[in-house]
Image (cartoon, grey):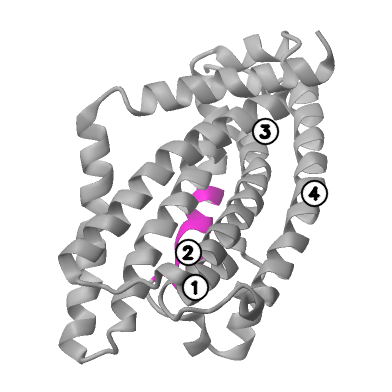
Amino acid sequence: MSRFTIFFKTAFARAYIRVKGGNRELSWIVWEVLLPLLMVSSVVYAYRTLGAPPEYIGFVIIGGAMISFWFNVVWGMGTSLYWEKETGNLEIFMVTPAPLEGLLLGMALGGLFNTSLRALSIVVIGVFLFGATLNVAGLLSAIIIFILTMVALYTLGVSIASIFLMYSRTGWRAAELLQEPVMFLSGLYYPISILPTILQSIASLIPLTIGLDGIRLSLVMGYSIWQLKFHIALLSAMIPIFAYASGKILHYMEVKAKREGRLTLRWM
């Protein structure tokens, strides 16, 4: 088989396992939808108590759905190589012709599929429970921005996964460090326009921030594709930059891990 055939077969096989395993237990799906809804509900009732504009309800629901993808990137994709190492699968993968990039792509696609189902359920149930109004006319622009955001976000996830390839449990500190600041800077429950200019500039470097803002403007404020050209251009520029950087980091970490014997767990 050609190199590309092996790459895509590896991605498909790993995505299939992720989708099959992630949906085999109905209770997992229920809790992964209900628990984020509790967090969304608390913020919705807080905004209603404060008399916030009704648009904020839609902002909260979309934010609660989109943050699921960041959690999946950090904990579902980022930590995946550590779990493979712990179960002894990583050393098997490394001696096969299957490329590590194809393995990560399969994890990304499988995780994206599962998380999309959960996120869509959060939006539908949230709209039904809280009466949020979404603009269907902005659906096309929202889909375009969503796709660009996911490509940029999961490409960034390759860099996070490479940290776990090298540093194993120590990488958990990096994952925890990335969680709360990104939730704050992404404008999870509020528009980033209320942040100071310096924080807005820093937040613009995170694809989730740009994507979340663009999807909100599409579905809540009714912005057209032309009005969101800045969001589309910025996300499109992030994708090749993150792809190049992630490839370099992954290769560096892989070579370093091989030299230092970190591809297997060492029990003391």
Image quarter for residue 60?
bottom left
The circle on residue 245 is 4
Q: Name the residue under label 1.
A: 218
Q: Is residue 70 above or below residue 85?
A: below
**In the rendered structure, which disc, 1 or 4, sits on the residue that comes first in sequence?**
1
Is the residue marked by circle 4 packed among few (<14), some (14-19), or many (20+) residues within 10 Å?
A: some
Q: Is residue 131 left or right of residue 22?
A: left
**In the rendered structure, which disc, 4 or 2, sits on the residue that comes first in sequence?**
2
Give coordinates of residue 184: x percent, y percent: 46, 71
**In the rendered structure, which disc, 1 or 2, sits on the residue that comes first in sequence?**
2
Q: Is residue 9 left or right of residue 245?
A: left
Q: How far apart are marks 1 and 2 (CA)?
A: 7 Å
Residue at figure coordinates x 26%, y 47% from the top left: 33
Q: Is residue 37 above or below residue 188?
A: above
Q: Name the residue under label 2.
A: 139
Q: Name the residue under label 3.
A: 166
Q: Distance between the residues labelled 1 and 4?
A: 30 Å
Whether the residues at callouts 1 and 2 have beta carbons within 8 Å, the answer is yes
Residue kind at label 1, given as amino acid type: Ser
**In the rendered structure, which disc, 2 or 3, sits on the residue that comes first in sequence?**
2
What residue range appears in magenta?
A: 174-188
Is the residue marked by circle 1 packed among few (<14), some (14-19), or many (20+) residues within 10 Å?
A: many
